[in-house]
Image (tube, helix red, strand yellow):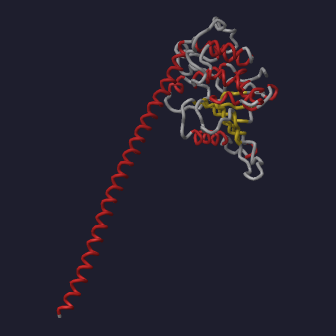
Amino acid sequence: MQENITMSKTGSTLNQGADSDQKPSLLQMRGLPTPTGFEEASGPLPYKMTNDAMFHIVFEACPKALAAFVGALLHLSPEEIISVEVTNPITYDSVYSKAFILDLKILLNGNAVLNIEMQVESLNFWQERSLGYLCRAFDNLNRGDGYLKVKSAIHVGILDFPLDPKDKTFYSTYYMMNEQTQKKYSDKLQLSVLQLRQIANATEEDRAWHLDLWAKFFKAETWEEIHMIAEQDPYIAMAAQTNYRACTDERIRSLCEGREEGEKTLRTLQMMCEMSQQALVKQSEEFRQALQQKDEVLQQKDEVIQQTQAENSRLRAELDALRQQNR
């Protein structure tokens, strides 16, 4: 892996604008030896890599692992990765925010904007959200720049929920292309999806790039699993050691807990919205049925009236006939 990989645009620290004894610094986690106790660690992980705060912290604090993962996603060899610059370094406030946050925004080799998003909660609007991120990433020209200077935009969604129940693909990539000829309109727009629940469907190419190992690392729930996976890839081993160091830092654990609390709040709000929607659907159906019943009653009344009018017409005709006979 290239040694000139940069970590972030601003020095990448969690204690910007605050005391260092209250907020952990990612710079303090770089280049340190294997943390004591990592090899003997066992049992469940306090926070998995699917926690978006942990995901961001580990990769920002371990640039070589980040470069290796980016290479696996984009099928780039180590020699092709010159620089990986995190342009949205994590901050204390952003971790505690209940709003949706972009997990990692990266400037790759100075000429491509890469968004990597870890998403564990099912979102009905994920496609629209990911397209929004992709389009904003592509709008990267500075005032006065020509269009030839526009950087490539890539969005990668790592999903721990089924995007489409019928889609069993582990890793898929989408481009803008001609519907008839399948020719790409441009190489500068790319959207990829890594489905963590479809590891069993990884292709030989996915396995060759160790994408299945990265997915297993993200999904791992125990240190025993982490050790088994780390033995198969040196860069995952680096990320695993950083993960352990982060998990043993009480300050970082509090940040991850804050993100989990935010996710719980989101799930609660989603459940309330779904319950409200279900109640509205039920009320609408009851109202529809009531209207239908009223329509049926009115229709029956109309039929009775029509029958009565027809009978009255018949009786009048008979009466008129009798009167004619009696004249």
**Which is nearer the eye, 270 or 190?**
270
Quadrant occupied by the C terminus: bottom left
**210 versus 297 height, above or below:** above
Residue plotted at (70% across, 15% down): 230
Say which residue appears at 64% left-offset and 12% top-offset.
224
Question: Taking the image as drawn, is residue 38 in sight?
Answer: yes
147 and 73: which is toward the camera:
73
Name the quadrant containing residue 52.
top right
Is 131 rendered above or below residue 324?
above
Report the residue at 78% width, 51% height from top: 181
Task: Please provide percent x and percent y for residue 163.
Answer: 60, 37
From this view, report whether residue 13 is shown above or below residue 148: above
- Residue 8 image position (x, y, % from top left): 67, 25
State the residue lying farthest toward the right: 79
Q: Residue furthest left?
A: 326
Q: Quadrant of the N terminus?
A: top right
Residue 192 coordinates in the image, percent (x, y)? 68, 36
Q: Splitting the image into 4 quarters, where does residue 63 fall?
A: top right
Left or right of 324, for residue 28:
right
Q: Report the number of numbered marks.
A: 0
Q: Nearer the viewer, residue 144 or 309?
A: 309
Residue 104: in sight, yes or no? no
Quadrant in which residue 158 is drawn:
top right
Horizontally, is 281 left or right of 183 in the view? left
